Image (cartoon, rainbow, N blue to C red):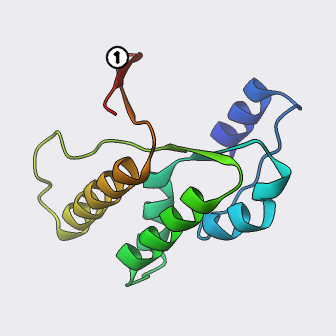
Amino acid sequence: MQERAAAHRAERGAAFTTFEEPRDPARVIQESGARFGAIVVDCLTLWLSNLLCSNIDNIPQIAANFLHVAVDSPSTVLLVTNEVGCGIVPENALARRFRDLAGAMNQQAASAAQEAYWMAFGVPIRLK
């Protein structure tokens, strides 16, 4: 993951400020939102994985709070996520929980967003 993050930073260049916050991106948005015209959160499903691996129980409430902070930010907040519900239902309980939480979080994010796009095969499809 460190190599992947380094590659992303190198691709973006020095003009972008990068924050690595595995569990509380809402705090970063609250503390830094006024300094930036736009903030990209990449990605919600990785954040969800971090919360699940930390054995955090109240993920739906944390996600709702995060979305509230993102919507209220003086910055434009762009959320990147993965769609994980188009495939088969996973056999193990953790994978099913992840899929269900990601689906609910993605629905809430799309509902709160002014615009929503689904990228399919590199083609952006406007949903909203």
Q: Quadrant of residue 73?
A: bottom right
Lateral position of residue 1 relative to residue 17, left or right: left
Q: Is residue 28 or residue 36 the one in the foreground?
A: 36
Q: Residue at x 40, y 78 (%)?
A: 61
Place of residue 87 in the rendered image (x, y in percent of width and height, measured from the top left) = 15, 40
Place of residue 113 in the rendered image (x, y in percent of width and height, measured from the top left) = 44, 47
Lateral position of residue 89 relative to residue 48, left or right: left
Question: How dense is the environment of label 1, judged by Cα within 10 Å: few (below 14), some, or many (20 and up)?
Answer: few
Q: Is residue 8 or residue 105 the one in the foreground?
A: 105
Place of residue 67 in the rendered image (x, y in percent of width and height, measured from the top left) = 49, 62
Lateral position of residue 51 relative to residue 73, left or right: left
Query: Label 1, on which residue?
Result: 121
Place of residue 104 in the rendered image (x, y in percent of width and height, measured from the top left) = 27, 60
Q: Residue at x 31, y 31 (%)?
A: 127
- Classify mark 1: helix, strand or loop: loop
Q: The residue under label 1 is which amino acid type?
A: Phe
Q: Is residue 36 or residue 84 the one in the foreground?
A: 36
Q: Quadrant of residue 122?
A: top left
